[in-house]
Amino acid sequence: MVSLASPRSGRAPVIMSWSGELSPPAAASGTRLLHGDLDLTIHEARGLPNMDFLSTLLRRLCLCLRPPARRPSPGQSRGSVPANEDGRRQPHGHHLLPTSDPYAAVVVAGNTLARTHVVRNSEDPEWSTHVLLHLAHHATGVAFHVKDADPFGSDLIGVAILPAADVLAAAAAPIVRRELPLYRPDGRGRPKPSSAIVITASFVPAGEHQSIYDAEHGGVPAAYFPARRGCEVKLYQDAHVAGGELDGVRRRGVFEPGRCWEDMCLAVLGAQHLVYVAGWSVNTKVRLVREAMSPEMAAKVEEVRTTATDDDDNPVAAEGMSLGALLKYKSQEGVRVCLLVWDDKTSHDTFFLKTVALPSVQIVGTMYTQHQKCLLVDTPASGSTRRITAFLGGLDLAAGRYDTPSHRLFADLGTVFSGDVYNPAIPPAGNKGGAGEEGPRQPWHDMHCRVDGPAAYDVLENFEQRWRKATKLFRRAKAHWKDDALLKLERISWILSPSDSGAGDGDDGDSHLYALPDGHPDCWNAQVFRSVDSGSVKGLPRCWETKKMEAKHLLCDKNVTVEQSIHTAYVRAIRSAKRFIYIENQYFIGSSFAWPSYKHQEGRHHLNLLNLSHHLSESIALKVASKIAAGERFAVYIVIPMWPEGVPTSGPIQEILFWQRQTMQAMYEVIAAAIRAAGMEGAAHPRDYLNFYCLGKREAAAAAAAAGGSPEQEHNPAASSARRHRRFMIYVHSKGMIVDDEYVIVGSANINQRSLAGSRDTEIAVGAYQPNLRAGAGAGDGQVFGFRMLLWEEHLGSSEWRELRSPESPECVKRVNEIAAENWRRYAADDDDVAMQGHLMRYPVDVGDDGKISELRGHEFFPDVGGRILGSTNNNYWDYLTM
């Protein structure tokens, strides 16, 4: 324990624990809600102890090594040496004897939010690191942990505290170069009498200047890529929307549903120069077009029918062309085809071996988790020119991903889904069959988008940065590798490309790239966001290039450069919300500092080690609480899978369900406290403002009977029970959010630490809105509104109810909850002939007036497949992977 006192206050010292939190006695008087943006610069540290002398001396004695003889040259600064011209030299000191390699970590409520770069061999390091931290924490202060970096771990040198009260006061009077004393972690005073860290800080509370539509900045200002005007965005749900589906929205002219996989196939067939694919998994046997085609697609298919071949060079009907055959066909036309995939050997090796002789096809497997999903092609622009078009979202071009809003379980297994029946929740039992070709298949719900205009070139830049990093890693193993696999667009005059002045630095320099003019009613402002780091992207500045880091709004994680702009975009959009938030996501886990289990010291230590630093769930809860305090209506709808993909009784899935329950309860408790504070106890319930849902389907008996069955399934209880009841969950793979029917985010990022940290899974997303439909006539009737109504027609079975136009209203919440509750009752019933209205169901947990989550009576386990709905955990080695 460490005794700390604010250097400018006369207060008695407070006690700070190892994790950077104040002890309970101090917390009772010093805990504050830090909700806003902390603009922080960590300048330097002074008077640090030598943490490396003894260990280095022993190592040299054992290895008989001489100490370095080089002395610092005259005129060199005390903490660093000048970097060479390209900034590659890492800052370090020049002591005759080895000393500490310090860096600083910023810790709030046990979560490490940022770290400086390491300065080698220095007791007076200069960092000059600037970070913008988004806070939504109840904390006693902001802690600064100064550590010594070692090859086998880091030693804590000392800790300094900026009290929460001082953070909040920095909103009115910014802190300028304040010196905070450092104290030992063992409570024995300061490491040296002069040990200190120097910071500058200012604070902007949430709600002040937080609009996502800020005219001055245009979108999210703290992002690598700026907001782009003149874009065209097309939103999709699922892989395909067949004729006759979702006719309600179409009939009223609100929104015309798209056919995502068909549009991608059409774009690839029409490409003349490049096809770039990035994906978590790419299965070359997947067929993109399976059902009745649009007139445009039919015409294109007819055009290529006589020239297309399959993977074995046999003629194939164009409408049945697999992804591999499609890419091979384009490469034979001279189109440059590049695939950036995760290193999943089962997904693409066969295709790679058969196309390695084609010079236009290049495949790179990444050594980290590549979770970005995008397709880039060249498409017609105006006249004879061409431009870049990007598709992105939950685009897994893999087995089991093709689906439509009807989400068939047993129907068309031998035609539309032939060879593509996928259900990981019902694996074979021993040598006996699982779901197999008899079903039920696991339906797949997703969200995607197409982007044209300047923002598409930011997606292209991301792909090129990723590609160059991946090829650099593989270059030594593949001596024949060529650096020129990517096309240089600036050398192809008829393909529009960014100007030198406008590329990546502003939103007005590339008006020739506009897909639609500024004043067009269908014009969009779009902005690309990412979760990446310097281990997955080439071209990011190095951590010690602090000016470049600040200009691109990047974070430092010791010696790794990190971009977290997806997290920033979600936070900004949530804080901008005025009426409602609608989310569909594959996962919903976060804000571990607010979890019920965090209140127990053992659980707290475990969660601090995992460092779930993102706080989207807490930001949503605080948004609802602020609306309750202001007496304004607000509603949040969150759609997640019934259980994560896999077997729900397995250890990892139960872990995820447990963390998900903790996240839900932390949110509901914040809202319940706000209801009590507003004097509405008994008149309002947390579910009047926040609700979680899942999707499920029960199919008519005729379809299940037509699918047939196998004797092996009788030996698999899950398979036979699901077939008997003709039901299964619809897996939600979407990664999107809609705010106020005006702003939409669609991408590859899940709401968990893996996707939002920036230093783990690589992710990409786009945020967009139509500026000409935000105010005045037509407000709320744009494409975002139409897309949300289309999703709700799929989920609710109808979009005719007037109250659905106002999702924040109590009437809308009541209507949706009544349908969802009845659908769950029908889904879980043992009756044979039970029809559901749409697919939306309440998530099967009970929420008390106090916000606590408990089992829904009679529904402790998932139907058919088993597994506790509330999950369980043993704090084991799965945690880092499941969060």
Image (spheres, rainbow, N blue to C red):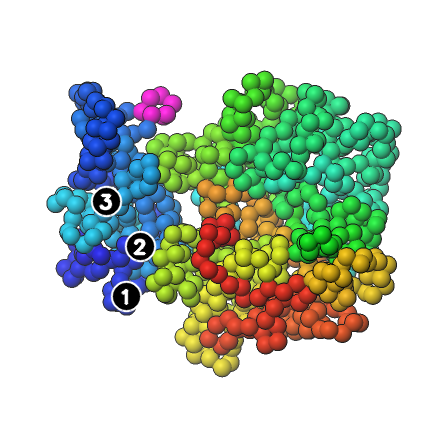
346 with respect to 204 (left or right)? right
Residue shown at 73% from the left, 33% from the top = 324
Residue where numbered disc 1 is placed: 24
Q: Name the residue nearer the viewer: 172 or 45.
A: 45
Q: Is residue 266 above or below residue 782?
A: above
| Residue 84 among those drawn in magenta | yes
Q: CA distance from mark 1 to mark 2?
A: 13 Å
Total number of numbered discs in the rendering? 3
Q: Name the residue nearer the viewer: 402 or 523.
A: 402
Tell me where the magenta segment starts and ends, as one range.
83-89
**Residue 117 percent location from the top left of the image:** 33, 37
Residue shown at 47% from the left, 56% from the top = 590
Tell which circle, 1 or 3, labels the residue nearer the N-terminal end: 1
**Residue 131 percent location from the top left of the image:** 36, 43
Residue where numbered disc 2 is placed: 19
Q: Name the residue nearer the viewer: 458 or 171.
A: 458
Give the number of the disc on residue 157: 3
SS type, badge 3: strand
Would you identify the image quadrant in which residue 487 lies? Answer: top right
Q: Main secondary structure of the magenta part?
A: loop
| Residue 678 seen anywhere in this rendered image of the structure | no
| Residue 305 among those drawn in magenta | no
Residue shown at 81% from the left, 52% from the top = 413
